[in-house]
């Protein structure tokens, strides 16, 4: 340590060094607490959005399906603050930028994440005709979450 350093033993008594370390530790603790509060706020907002969608659907679809669709759409929006609002009538192409192959990928990812049966090629061929809104997507995926076969 250079003799001109403010932390040199001759220029800085041990009490001052301890005080500086305590202030530094307190600063790090405050930063960690601030990060944790923001994370809790994000999770809370996301749960509010999911609860809102769930309430609008009035229990017509399995919980895992609704949560999977909401989570996928929120992630797709790059939602970092939990502010995504998903309504059953949202147009997937316009409101969530899901069309054609993106929609097929979405269906496969949502089903896979939830451990549901994956739709087959025939089911995916019908996807573009049957699915235009969030509720259509839920209706399309519902049989795969319940273990039934998709009606053709």
Image: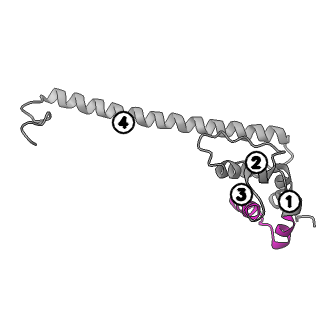
N-terminal of the pair, mark 4 or mark 3, is 4
Give the magenta range. Answer: 102-127
* 53 or 142, nearer to the observer: 53
Distance from the alpha carbon under mark 1 to that under mark 4: 50 Å
In the rendered structure, find residue 28 and report the number of the disc placed on it.
Answer: 4
Q: Position of residue 23 (x, y in %)?
A: 29, 29
Q: Would you say residue 59 sits in the magenta stretch?
A: no
At mark 1, the secondary structure is helix
N-terminal of the pair, mark 3 or mark 2, is 2
Distance from the alpha carbon under mark 4 to that under mark 3: 38 Å
At mark 2, the secondary structure is helix
Name the residue tied to disc 1: 143
N-terminal of the pair, mark 3 or mark 1, is 3
Mark nearest the camera among 3 and 2 is: 2
- Mark 3 Cα-neighbour bin, 10 Å: few <14, some 14–19, many ≥20: some
Q: Residue furthest right?
A: 152
Q: Position of residue 28 (x, y in %)?
A: 36, 36
At mark 3, the secondary structure is helix
Q: Is residue 82 left or right of residue 69?
A: left
Name the residue tied to disc 2: 95
């Amino acid at each position: 340590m250079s003799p001109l350093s403010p932390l040199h033993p001759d220029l800085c008594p041990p009490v001052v060094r301890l005080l500086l370390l305590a202030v530094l530790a307190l600063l790090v603790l405050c930063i960690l607490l601030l990060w944790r509060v923001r994370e809790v706020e994000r999770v809370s907002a996301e749960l509010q959005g999911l609860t809102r969608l769930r309430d609008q659907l009035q229990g017509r679809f399995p919980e895992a399906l609704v949560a999977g669709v909401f989570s996928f759409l929120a992630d797709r929006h790059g939602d970092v603050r939990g502010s995504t609002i998903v309504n059953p009538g949202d147009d997937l192409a316009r409101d969530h930028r899901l069309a054609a192959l993106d929609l097929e990928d979405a269906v496969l990812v949502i089903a896979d994440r939830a451990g549901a049966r994956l739709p087959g090629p025939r089911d995916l061929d019908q996807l573009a005709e049957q699915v235009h809104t969030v509720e259509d997507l839920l209706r399309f995926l519902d049989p795969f979450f319940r273990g039934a076969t998709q009606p053709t």
